[in-house]
């Protein structure tokens, strides 16, 4: 079974390589089955062989010796692959690859194209309005080129108006185009156009279309990068969720919790948003809300939803209700675990695909100090951005003017893309599985504040049974020194605790219990209700 699993994974990688190099004989559903289906089946066979071949119980044997889970070569390669994937998805339009192709245009001073040479010249006919034939440039002005992109026309126009100075500029489509103009002879100008491929365009041509059969059925549209990303993300949660179910099959709490994150990721974060697009409705993610999904509380988003009436009004009410009513209420009764370990897609990936890396979290005092400053700083930042946008909207744009979108875009790029994605997931094999949840997630920050001061949830300890083995601290993905509390018999009430329950699961003596009790007497209460 193990060998068959590896063969299927290699088959999937080989199918993808053959497709990228243009030598694949498969297409459509068969190609999708070989590229994705074979590795998924192979992974399932490996997990079944690994965990069902032994009695139920925690098995972390050799976890500090394996290259994947101990920051070895395999782990570093996985980190590079994950980081690279996120860079391509989020920043692929800016990532240039390959050698540039050039065209050289000779222009009269009035902008008429006199000649076009270079390898790129024949392809420019596709971007010229009304141009046909091999000599498409005859009797054509520059402003008929790239008529739907002002970057080209503005650059050339600037040079023609001031011919003594060079003009350069760039504009983006699927490729990156760079245009430069210099003075020629006999009252003529030379315009050079360089085209360079981008990682986004390469993936749009060769990778994203692999999922067209699935995307056509689910969303009614060809696959784009966000469908591709959402599909891979969901597959990872489901596939490694099966691994969690097999590994922790002796623990009822872990089984139910894992099934919950799989359900919410598949249903609420993948199927429902795509089905909404299929039925021509606005896309909406019911498992994310402010401040993790900050745009759901931006005035521009609310205006857009309200303009569509019908479901848009419901989306606004749902987003506001979950933020201001459901979040504090559920956190009061269950702690932050109701979201971070049972619903959230970020937590779902961390708890499933990130399970082999949970022991890599930093338990040092410096890490805890950095954690408090960074995560609460992000919460303050997104709160200020949201308040600024609403204030600006109420003042009719007089406060920020054209800068109103810059704040939200900057936050989305540096926090929403780079921090949560590139670092948060890409660094699993280096810093553990909860980098984003621990250091950057504003939702975790606000839930942590509520959990610390206004929640019935706590982890109780039976210090008399503790043997100081340290398993609880070792496998705490949030970097909490659980053993310190257990040795002293103190209840654990930490803002960062996501209530995953792994500390209790790995304890050989049953020292730790996840419990609910009175909010006024949370420290060492003997009569609390045990939830295991």
Image (cartoon, rainbow, N blue to C red):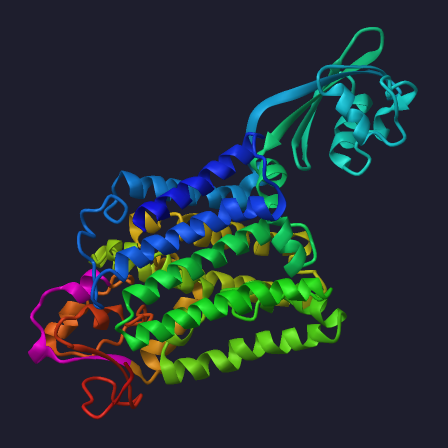
Q: Is residue 486 magenta?
A: no
User: Is residue 21 depicted above or below 470 in this figure?
Assistant: above
- Residue at 58% across / 55% down in the picture? 407
Decide whether residue 467 is among the magenta residues. yes
Judge whether residue 448 can be spotted in this image.
no
The one nearer the camera, 443 or 35, is 35
Residue at position x 61%, y 52% in the image: 406
Whether residue 367 is situated above or below residue 124 in the rendered picture:
below
Dividing the picture into quadrants, the one containing residue 390 is bottom right
- Give x and y (percent) for residue 440: 40, 58
Residue 191 x/y as whole percent = 75, 18
Is residue 147 among what the camera can see?
yes
Residue furthest to the bottom: 527
| Position in image of residue 45 (x %, y %) | 36, 54
314, above or below 48, in the image: below
The answer to whether residue 248 is left or right of residue 346 is left
Classify residue 126 by image quadrant: top right
Quadrant where the C terminus lies? bottom left
Q: In the image, is 184 to the left or to the right of 508? A: right
Identify which residue, 372 or 99, lies in the foreground: 99
The stretch of residues the image draws in magenta is 458-475
Find residue 303 and report its image quarter: bottom right
């Amino acid at each position: 079974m193990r060998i068959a699993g590896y063969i299927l994974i290699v088959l999937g990688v080989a199918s993808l390589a053959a497709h990228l190099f243009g030598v694949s004989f498969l297409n459509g559903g068969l190609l999708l089955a070989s590229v994705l289906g074979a590795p998924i089946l192979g992974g399932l066979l490996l997990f079944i062989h690994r965990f069902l071949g032994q009695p139920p119980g925690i098995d972390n044997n050799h976890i500090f010796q394996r290259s994947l889970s101990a920051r070895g070569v395999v782990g570093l390669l996985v980190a590079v692959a994950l980081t690279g994937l996120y860079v391509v998805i989020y920043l692929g339009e800016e990532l240039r690859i390959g050698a540039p192709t050039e065209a050289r245009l000779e222009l009269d001073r009035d902008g008429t194209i006199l000649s076009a040479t270079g390898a790129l010249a024949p392809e420019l006919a596709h971007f010229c309005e009304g141009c046909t034939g091999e000599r498409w440039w005859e009797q054509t002005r520059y402003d008929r080129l790239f008529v739907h992109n002002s970057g080209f026309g503005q650059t050339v126009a600037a040079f023609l108006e001031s011919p003594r100075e060079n003009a350069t500029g760039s504009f983006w489509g699927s490729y990156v185009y760079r245009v430069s103009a210099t003075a020629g002879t006999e009252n003529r100008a030379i315009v050079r156009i360089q085209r360079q491929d981008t990682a986004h365009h390469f993936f749009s041509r060769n990778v994203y279309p692999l999922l067209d059969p699935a995307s056509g059925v689910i969303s009614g549209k060809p696959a784009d990068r966000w469908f591709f990303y959402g599909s891979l993300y969901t597959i990872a949660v489901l596939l490694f969720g099966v691994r969690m179910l097999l590994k922790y099959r002796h623990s009822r709490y872990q089984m139910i919790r894992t099934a919950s994150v799989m359900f919410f990721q598949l249903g609420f974060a993948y199927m429902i948003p795509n089905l909404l697009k299929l039925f021509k409705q606005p896309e909406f993610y019911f498992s994310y809300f402010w401040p993790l999904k900050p745009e759901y509380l931006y005035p521009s988003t609310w205006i857009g939803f309200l303009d569509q009436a019908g479901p848009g009004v419901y989306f606004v009410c749902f987003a506001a209700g979950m933020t201001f009513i459901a979040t504090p209420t559920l956190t009061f009764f269950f702690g932050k675990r109701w979201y971070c370990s049972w619903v959230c897609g970020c937590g779902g990936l961390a708890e499933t695909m990130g399970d082999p890396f949970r022991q890599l979290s930093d338990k040092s005092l410096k890490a805890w100090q950095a954690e408090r400053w960074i995560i609460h700083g992000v919460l303050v930042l997104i709160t200020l951005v949201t308040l600024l946008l609403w204030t600006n909207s109420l003042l009719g744009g007089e406060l920020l003017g054209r800068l109103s979108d810059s704040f939200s875009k900057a936050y989305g790029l540096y926090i929403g893309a780079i921090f949560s994605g590139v670092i948060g997931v890409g660094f699993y094999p280096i810093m553990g599985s909860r980098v984003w949840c621990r250091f950057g997630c504003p939702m975790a920050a606000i839930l942590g504040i509520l959990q610390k001061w206004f929640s019935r949830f706590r982890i109780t300890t039976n210090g008399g049974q503790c043997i100081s083995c340290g398993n609880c601290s070792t496998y705490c993905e949030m970097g909490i020194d659980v053993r310190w509390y257990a040795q002293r018999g103190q209840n654990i009430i930490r803002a960062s605790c996501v209530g995953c329950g792994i500390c209790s699961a790995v304890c050989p003596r049953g020292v730790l219990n996840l419990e609910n009790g009175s909010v006024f007497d949370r420290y060492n209460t003997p009569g609390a209700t045990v939830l295991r």
